[in-house]
């Protein structure tokens, strides 16, 4: 039971510490001149998930429930700064926020234009939310072995811990939605000491409770990165050694930094 709790709790604590750190920063906002282009385009790249699993199918028939955690990093930029070459008709996209939508005064916009280092651009014309990109992920989960009772006694299947390293690609069908496709190597560790190497994959979807313009405004006006919360669900599949593949349904929460 210790291994059921240890890693997810550790990652939750780390996420909370990051959140507390962000709250401390909020009390002392940076001046607008402290904002750089990287902060605008790359904030929100780190994600921490806490998940619950339900094993299904033949491969999961010896397990009842599961729990775990994932740490994911987006390899590309989450936003793009658009300059003079930006086309006005692109503003119709729900993923693009024009200069006027940023809610900043003329003086603040002039200051921002001078400090973000927009090469070859006279001024910021719009901010575009990047709708797709690659990611890397490390995850851990444990599946709890079932206990079967029979006449004269009972038998409990071993708990199975699974560690994986996935690479993947994500697509945003809407400004607050994200669908991810991932695959990579996996290692199964049994409580009794055995292990099995294999592979796995996952398809997950997320809904972000925060509209994209909110963290953008926060960065511009207060010089702060936002902590955003999402809810997600999906399916994962693991094939470990010669055993039947394990399919799980996943449901969890995500904190993005």
Image (cartoon, grey):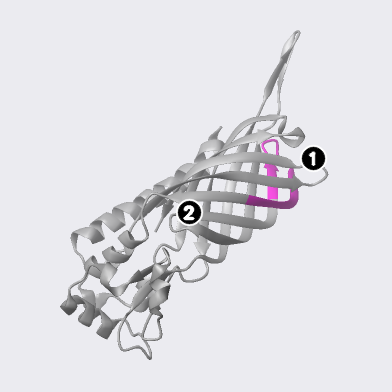
**Magenta stretch: helix, strand or loop mostly:** strand
Q: Residues within 10 Å of mark 2 (few under 14, many from 20)?
A: some
Q: Which mark is residue 244?
A: 1
For image coordinates 63% across by 57% down, the residue present is: 182
Residue 122 visible somewhere in the drawing: yes
Q: Indicate the quadrant containing the C terminus: top left, top right, bottom left or bottom right.
A: bottom left
Mark 1 and mark 2: Cα distance apart in space: 33 Å
Left/right placement of residue 99 relative to residue 53 reads left
Percent position (x, y) of residue 110? 21, 82
Looking at the rendered image, the disc whose residue lies closer to the viewer, 1 or 2, is 2
- The residue lying at 47 percent from left, 52 percent from top is 48
Callout 1 secondary element? loop
Q: Residue at x 55, y 37 (%)?
A: 4
Query: In what quadrant of the picture does the N terminus appear?
Result: top right
- Range covered by the magenta-colored residues: 187-202
> Is 194 one of the magenta-colored residues?
yes
Question: Residue most toward the bottom?
Answer: 120
Q: Identify whether 155 is placed above or below 86.
A: above
Q: Position of residue 202 (x, y in %)?
A: 64, 50
User: To which residue does mark 2 refer?
Assistant: 177
In the depicted structure, whether residue 180 falls above or below residue 108: above
Q: Nearer the viewer, residue 62 or 54?
A: 54
- Asked if residue 16 is among those painted magenta in the image, a careful observer would answer no
């Amino acid at each position: 039971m210790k291994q059921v709790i240890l890693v997810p709790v550790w990652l939750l604590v780390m996420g909370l510490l990051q959140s507390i750190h962000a709250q401390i920063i909020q009390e002392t906002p940076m001046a607008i001149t402290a904002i750089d282009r990287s902060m605008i385009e790359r904030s929100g790249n780190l994600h921490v998930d806490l998940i619950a699993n339900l094993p299904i199918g033949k491969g999961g028939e010896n397990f009842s429930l599961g729990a775990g955690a994932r740490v994911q990093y987006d390899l590309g930029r989450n936003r793009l700064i658009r300059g003079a070459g930006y086309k006005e008709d692109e503003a119709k996209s729900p993923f693009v926020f024009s200069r006027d939508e940023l809610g900043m005064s003329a003086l603040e916009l002039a200051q921002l234009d001078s400090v973000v280092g927009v090469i070859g651009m006279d001024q910021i014309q719009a901010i575009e939310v990047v709708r797709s990109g690659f990611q890397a992920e490390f995850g851990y989960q444990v599946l709890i072995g079932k206990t079967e009772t029979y006449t004269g006694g009972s038998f409990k299947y071993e708990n199975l811990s699974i560690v994986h390293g996935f690479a993947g690609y994500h697509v945003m069908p809407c400004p607050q939605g994200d669908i991810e496709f991932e695959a990579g190597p996996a290692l199964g560790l049994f409580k009794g000491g055995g292990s099995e190497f294999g592979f796995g994959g996952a398809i997950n979807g997320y809904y972000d409770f925060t509209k994209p313009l909110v963290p953008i405004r926060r960065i511009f006006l207060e010089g702060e990165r936002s902590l955003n919360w999402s809810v997600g669900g999906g399916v994962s599949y693991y094939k470990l050694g010669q055993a039947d593949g394990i399919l799980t349904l996943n449901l969890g929460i995500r904190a993005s930094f």
